[in-house]
């Protein structure tokens, strides 16, 4: 049996939180200290392979996926990624990108308090306007700047538990947790 294996992902969040950097880390495994702010939106694709074990051992698998539903070689998932522009003047374009998204990664910067307010704004907007099936993942970036942290994981958990959202902390700079973020999203979408 063939499962859908191509998914659309959108990234949203305040300017300079590192949306493009997270995508660049995932797609090209590289990082730029000096990056131009995105204009409008950027489109990128990347594939990720899930082994049979990745899928079966996922804590979220409610046994609707069994050994027979997945090939022994696992599944290759292709992501179509819309990296939106965080600057205020582009805000009204966002709905075009999140409308049909299978997953939305809402990014904040763990060193910038206001960036969490903007993230909460996007989560509320998505819950009102987006497809009910869209998986929302709240992601704190710049984990390498842990010494300058202004937002604790507890601050965020309070919020994500109400809305039942996935919750990650990553660093585009060091790459910490970036692949894991996309892999977990892939698994969530595949077992859905
Ligand atoms: P817009 O396109 O304007 O919405 O911004 P963006 O969210 O795409 O941010 P971008 O990826 O352009 O990164 C903004 C700045 O933060 C750049 O100077 C990056 O080098 C820096 N940056 C991004 N990710 C990290 C990170 O994980 N750690 C550190 N220390 N800096 C980062
Ligand atoms: Mg950008």
Image (cartoon, rainbow, N blue to C red):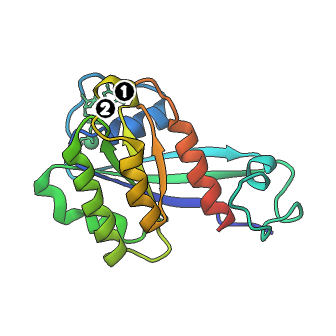
Give percent across and percent down for residue 28.
47, 31
Is residue 130 at all visible to an observer of this figure? Answer: yes
Q: Residue at x 47, y 51 (%)?
A: 167
Is residue 43 in view? Answer: no
Task: Identify the residue under disc 2.
Answer: 149
Point out residue 12 in the picture as x, y percentages from the top left corner.
Answer: 31, 54
Which image quadrant shows ligand 2?
A: top left
Q: Where is mark 1, residue-wise?
A: 146
Image quarter in which the N terminus is found: bottom right
Marks 2/1 in contact by CB < 8 Å: the verdict is: yes
Quadrant including the C terminus = bottom right
Front residue of 163 and 76: 163
Q: Furthest residue to the left?
A: 89
Disc 2 crowd rating (10 Å Cα; few below 14, some 14-19, many 20+) is some
- Count of numbered badges drawn on the protein: 2
- Residue 45 screen position, x and y as percent: 48, 47
Secondary element at tag 2? loop
Is 38 positioned to the left or the right of 100 in the image?
A: left
Q: CA distance from mark 2 to mark 1?
A: 5 Å
Asked whether 24 or 62 is in front, the reply is 62
Regarding mark 1 in the picture, which secondary structure is present there?
Answer: helix
| Mark 1 C-beta to ligand 1 under 8 Å | no
In this picture, residue 70 sits left or right of residue 187: right
Residue drawn 21% across the image and 49% down it: 86
Q: Residue at x 31, y 32 (%)?
A: 149
111 up-or-down from 42: above or below: above
């Amino acid at each position: 049996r063939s499962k859908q294996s191509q998914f659309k992902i959108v990234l949203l969040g305040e300017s300079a939180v590192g949306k493009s950097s997270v995508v660049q880390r995932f797609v090209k495994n590289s990082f730029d200290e000096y990056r131009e702010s995105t204009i409008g939106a950027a489109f990128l694709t990347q594939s990720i392979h899930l082994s049979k074990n990745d899928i079966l051992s996922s804590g979220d698998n409610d046994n609707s996926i069994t050994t027979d539903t997945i090939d022994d070689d696992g599944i290759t998932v292709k992501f179509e990624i819309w990296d939106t522009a965080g600057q205020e003047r582009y805000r009204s374009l966002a709905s075009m990108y999140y409308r049909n998204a299978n997953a939305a990664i809402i990014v904040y910067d763990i060193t910038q308090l206001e960036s969490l307010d903007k993230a909460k704004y996007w989560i509320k907007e998505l819950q009102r306007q987006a497809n009910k099936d869209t998986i929302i993942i709240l992601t704190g970036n710049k984990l390498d700047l842990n010494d300058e942290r202004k937002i604790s994981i507890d601050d965020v958990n309070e919020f994500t538990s109400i809305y039942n959202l996935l919750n990650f902390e990553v660093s585009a700079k060091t790459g910490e947790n970036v692949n894991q973020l996309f892999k977990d999203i892939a698994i969530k979408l595949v077992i859905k």
